[in-house]
Image (tube, rainbow, N blue to C red):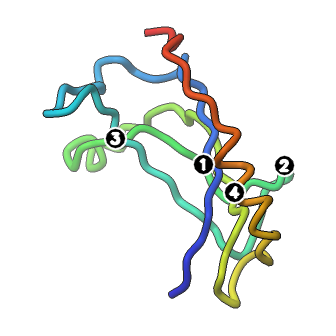
Amino acid sequence: MGKIGVSISINVEKIEKARLFKGAKGTYLDLTTFIDLDEKDQYGNHGFISQTVSEDERKAKVQTPILGNCKIFYTDSERGTNPPEPAQATAQVDNFIFDDDIPF
């Protein structure tokens, strides 16, 4: 299988803070996504992002809120979208600005 580039956007205000956990190098949140390589939604997204549920929660059919969406912007395989020019893929990553103004 080839490589794919996925752009992810989440609404941090929807994060259930009880699902944050301390790790050796910081505070973490487990997320889950399902990506459909063959079909996009009406907004051009290939999937959604939600908080991961435990096996017991999954059996109990617990659903966490959808935090955001994901979009494939690059693939080097025959499947999915055509790869953009390398400068475009790099620009998306290079333009990412992380700031500590997270509302939790």
Of 81 and 69, the residue lying toward us: 81
Q: Closest to the observer: 85 or 38?
A: 85
Question: Which numbered disc, 1 or 4, marks the residue that appears first in the sequence?
Answer: 1
Question: Residue 79 got which mark?
Answer: none
Is there a contact, CB below 8 Å, between mark 2 and mark 3?
Answer: no
Residue 88: give x, y in percent of width and height: 79, 59
Q: Identify the residue at horizontal 69%, vertical 57% (top origin).
A: 90
Q: Residue tagged by mark 2?
A: 43
Q: Whole-Å distance between the Cαs marked 3 and 1?
A: 14 Å
- The disc, 4 or 3, on the residue closer to the chain's N-terminal end is 3
User: Disc 1 vs disc 2: Cβ atoms closer than 8 Å?
Assistant: no
Query: Which residue is identified by label 3?
Result: 30
Which residue bears the numbered disc 4? 90
Residue 35, by quadrant, is bottom right
Q: Amino acid at mark 4?
A: Thr
Write the residue at 20% across / 44% down. 56
Query: Residue at coordinates 22% horizontally, 50% vertically from top-left?
Result: 55
Question: Regarding mark 1 in the picture, which secondary structure is present there?
Answer: strand
What is the C-alpha distance between the residues marked 1 and 2? 12 Å
Residue carrying label 1: 48
In the rendered view, would you say 59 is above or below 22?
below
Q: CA distance from mark 2 to mark 3?
A: 25 Å
Quick check: marks 3 and 1 in contact, CB under 8 Å?
no
Q: CA distance from mark 4 to mark 3?
A: 26 Å
Q: Circles 2 and 4: CB distance less than 8 Å?
A: no
Quarter of the picture holding the C terminus: top left
Above or below, 7 against 86 in this view is above
Q: Is residue 60 left or right of residue 47?
A: left
**Hey, which quadrant is residue 29 in on the image?**
top left
Q: Amino acid at mark 1?
A: Phe
